[in-house]
Image (cartoon, grey):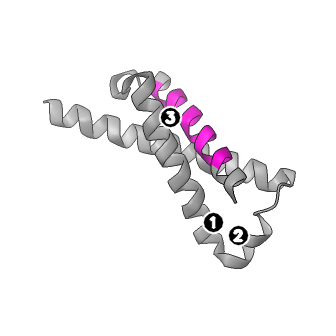
């Protein structure tokens, strides 16, 4: 269980930084992008596990290649999405 969370958190932080690089206006800086991405990665990974149902989540909880790819993808996308949302809200509040 802890390995999956670490994979999701790291891929979320990477996804947040990639999104910050692409969306320069919404970037929160490297630290902000990493923190938002990390939280989004954990949330995205847990949300995907919940959407797949408990049986699928248990099957995907191993360390086979398919499960790792799924965790990286869900963490990265979750991190990028949360970083973008936080960046957009921050920009709107600054106006």
Q: Position of residue 79 (x, y in %)?
A: 51, 42
Mark 1, secondary structure of its residue: helix
Earlier-in-chain disc, 1 versus 3 = 3
Q: Are the two marked residues, 1 and 2, in contact with CB atoms closer than 8 angstroms?
A: yes
Distance between mark 1 and mark 2 Cα atoms: 5 Å
Magenta segment boundaries in residue numbering = 6-20
Residue named by callout 2: 57
Could you say which is closer to the camera, residue 61 or residue 48?
61
Compared across the picture, whether 59 is left or right of 89 comes to right
Q: Are the two marked residues, 1 and 3, in contact with CB atoms closer than 8 angstroms?
A: no
Relative to 39, say whether 19 is above or below: above
Compared across the picture, whether 13 is left or right of 64 comes to left
Classify 10 Å Cα crowding around label 2: few (below 14), some (14-19), many (20 and above).
Answer: some
Residue at horizontal 86%, vertical 55%? Answer: 64
So how many labels did they put on this image? 3
Kindly identify which numbered label has been placed on residue 16.
3
Mark 2, secondary structure of its residue: helix
Position of the C terminus, as image quadrant, is top left
Earlier-in-chain disc, 3 versus 2 = 3
Classify 10 Å Cα crowding around label 3: few (below 14), some (14-19), many (20 and above).
Answer: many
Distance between mark 3 and mark 2 Cα atoms: 24 Å
Classify 10 Å Cα crowding around label 1: few (below 14), some (14-19), many (20 and above).
Answer: many
**Residue 13 among magenta residues:** yes
Work out which residue is located at the far left of the displayed protein and give it: 95
The image quadrant of residue 29 is top left
Residue named by callout 1: 49
Compared across the picture, whether 41 is left or right of 67 comes to left
Earlier-in-chain disc, 1 versus 2 = 1
Q: Position of residue 92 (x, y in %)?
A: 20, 36
Residue at horizontal 75%, vertical 63%? Answer: 61
């Amino acid at each position: 269980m802890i390995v999956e969370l670490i994979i999701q958190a790291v891929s979320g932080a990477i996804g947040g930084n990639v999104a910050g690089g692409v969306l320069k206006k919404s970037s929160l800086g490297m630290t902000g992008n990493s923190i938002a991405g990390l939280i989004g990665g954990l949330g995205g990974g847990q949300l995907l596990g919940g959407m797949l149902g408990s049986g699928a989540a248990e099957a995907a909880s191993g360390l086979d290649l398919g499960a790792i790819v799924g965790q990286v993808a869900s963490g990265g996308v979750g991190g990028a999405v949360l970083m973008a949302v936080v960046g957009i809200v921050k920009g709107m509040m600054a106006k």
